[in-house]
């Protein structure tokens, strides 16, 4: 094996070791501990959990939270897309505002929400200043389940804007809004983005396609034609993907 063949594996080795040591090994260890009982391996721990009176209410609350959060995320995404698509000016500014959560880690976001809802936090201070309450109240308490549930929903909605950068949903939405705002028919823009994603296009590919479409429109080409040309240019950089993606483009209204 020559050096060129060995080099990719050497470059992957540090990341692989990191994942094995800090993710794979702890996962296996925790999975084994889940079946450990005083008498040996068994399912006694799971039986104890299922018999606990707190387990099924927790499952119910988790399912309810998932339904509410997903529904609100969908509505929020549609509203954001509509706002950006309807703007004629300051569109880039609004897009930058929508991406502010990307600059915050999950830890920083958690500390911010804690600072808002804790007893001496911003929300209590504002309620006291407005005269709604006489003194700060303990919001994050089991006695205020509604406030707790609302706080979790708000934090999850914020976290929805902090997806893993490898997730293309947000970038696809931004590119779609931008293309539609520049005159590309919605069906054409949607078909181009779906085809690009199905062909394995990354965030960088989608943004490059958007810039290509912008340049073509500035040179006088019709928006629909510019979008189709941008898609062809993207597919030409990915040999073998054109046929796979063309089916999506044809099926998109």
Image (cartoon, helix red, strand yellow):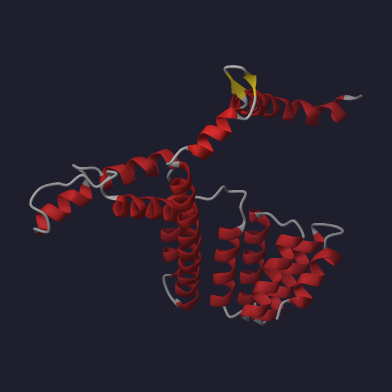
Q: Is any part of residue 106 visible from this angle?
A: yes
Q: Is residue 51 left or right of residue 139?
A: right
Pinpoint residue 181: horizontal percent, then vertical percent. 53, 76
Task: Report the front residue among 205 and 112.
Answer: 112
Can you say which quadrant of the picture contains the N terminus? top right
Looking at the image, which residue sits at the far top?
A: 39
Q: Is any part of residue 99 visible from this angle?
A: no
Pinpoint residue 44: horizontal percent, then vertical percent. 58, 28
Pinpoint residue 211: horizontal percent, then vertical percent. 62, 65
Give above or below for 54 relative to 133.
Answer: above
For the point 47% across and 42% down, which residue is it?
Answer: 55
Asked which quadrant contains residue 222, the reply is bottom right
Q: Is residue 10 left or right of residue 36?
A: right
Task: Report the front residue among 98 and 229.
Answer: 98
Task: Report the front residue among 44 and 183.
Answer: 44
Pinpoint residue 207: horizontal percent, then vertical percent. 62, 60
For the point 50% across and 54% down, which residue is it?
Answer: 63
Give above or below for 38 relative to 59.
Answer: above
Q: Is residue 46 left or right of residue 224?
A: left
- How many numbered marks, from 0 up? 0
Give above or below for 54 relative to 102.
Answer: above
For the point 87% across and 59% down, which residue is it?
Answer: 240
For the point 45% across and 61% down, which residue is it?
Answer: 68
Give above or below for 65 relative to 49.
Answer: below
Task: Report the front residue among 140 and 113.
Answer: 140
Q: Is residue 93 left or right of residue 249?
A: left
Can you say which quadrant of the picture contains the C terminus? bottom right
């Amino acid at each position: 094996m020559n050096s060129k063949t060995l080099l990719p594996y050497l470059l992957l080795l540090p990341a692989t070791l990191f994942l094995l040591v800090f993710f794979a090994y702890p996962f296996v260890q925790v999975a084994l501990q889940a079946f450990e009982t005083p008498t040996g391996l068994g399912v006694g721990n799971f039986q104890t959990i299922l018999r606990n009176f707190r387990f099924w209410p927790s499952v119910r609350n988790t399912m309810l939270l998932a339904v509410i959060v997903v529904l609100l995320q969908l509505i929020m995404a549609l509203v954001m897309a509509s706002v950006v698509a309807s703007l004629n000016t300051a569109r880039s500014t609004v897009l930058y505002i929508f991406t502010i959560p990307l600059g915050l880690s999950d830890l920083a976001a958690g500390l911010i929400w804690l600072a808002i809802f804790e007893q001496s936090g911003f929300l209590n201070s504002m309620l006291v200043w407005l005269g709604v309450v006489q003194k700060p109240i303990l919001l994050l308490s089991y006695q205020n389940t509604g406030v707790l549930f609302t706080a979790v929903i708000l934090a999850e909605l914020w976290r929805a804007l902090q997806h893993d950068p490898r997730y293309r949903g947000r970038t696809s939405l931004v590119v779609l809004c931008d293309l539609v705002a520049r005159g590309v028919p919605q069906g054409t823009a949607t078909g181009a983005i779906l085809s690009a994603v199905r062909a394995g296009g990354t965030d960088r590919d989608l943004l490059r396609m958007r810039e290509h479409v912008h340049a073509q429109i500035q040179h006088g080409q019709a928006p629909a034609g510019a979008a189709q040309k941008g898609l062809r240019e993207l597919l030409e950089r990915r040999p073998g993907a054109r046929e796979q993606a063309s089916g999506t483009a044809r099926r998109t209204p």
